Image (cartoon, helix red, strand yellow):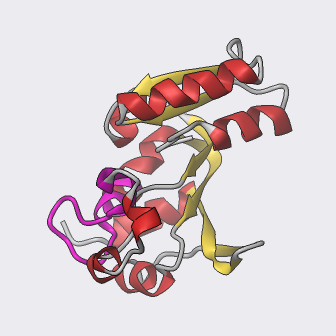
Amino acid sequence: DLCTGNGSLAVLAAMAWPEVQVTGADLSTDALAVAALNVARHALDARITLRQGDGLAAVAGQAFDLILCNPPYVNAQSMAALPPEFRAEPEMALSGNLLGGSDGMDFIRALLRDAPAHLTEHAVLVLEIGHEREHFEAAFPTLEAVWLPTSAGDDQVLLVSREALQALQAAAPS
């Protein structure tokens, strides 16, 4: 669970698949402190490991069958228009523009570039992008993704195979 925040996806994954080990990673030590409380509350300390670090650097050298990620993805225009209740969240948890972009895809570009090295042969990446499908598809027009239906709609969460990510890398200019 990359960008685990409060650890809810890590906890849900561990509960859904009782036979697996789960790693939750986040840059924020404050978020990881809350995640640790949630992991303990659900008695999953033996199955969920929390790691601090920036993106996939937090799990350097590891490969996974599944990466779940709810990254910062809000574009600059949407960030400027967020209502006050969203502004209570740390900017680093929402803005996908912290590296100087404006389309909300800064973190996601690095993630898609680096993910194949962290995925086992038949693994997948499940990625939430909220209302940013237009920006996602503009940034990655050749990426073969499967859009997953959710209670929030059919265009907010996508699944990408390791193979599709490798094809994206192969097509990228050097």
Residue 51, percent from left and from top: 45, 24
Residue 149 magenta: no
State which quarter of the image contains the N terminus: top right
Query: Is residue 144 rendered to the left or right of residue 11?
Result: left
Residue at x 66% of width, y 76% of height: 147
Q: Nearer the viewer, residue 78 or 48?
A: 78
Q: Residue at the far left: name it.
A: 100
For the image, the number of numbered tags is 0
Residue at x 33% of width, y 71% of height: 104
State which quarter of the image contains the C terminus: bottom left
Residue at x 35% of width, y 73% of height: 171
Query: Is residue 147 rendered to the left or right of residue 167?
Result: right
Residue 78, percent from left and from top: 35, 80
Residue 48, percent from left and from top: 65, 22
Q: Nearer the viewer, residue 147 or 8?
A: 8
Quadrant location of residue 56? top left
Query: Is residue 86 rendered to the left or right of residue 9?
Result: left
Which region of the structure is painted magenta?
91-111
Q: Which of 116 and 138 is in front in this view?
A: 138
Q: Residue at the far front: name it.
A: 84
Residue at x 52% of width, y 79% of height: 131
Vertical side of 81 occupied by 71: above or below: above
Residue 104 magenta: yes
Q: Nearer the viewer, residue 12 or 63?
A: 12
Vertical side of 57 occupied by 66: above or below: below
Q: Residue at the far top: name it.
A: 46
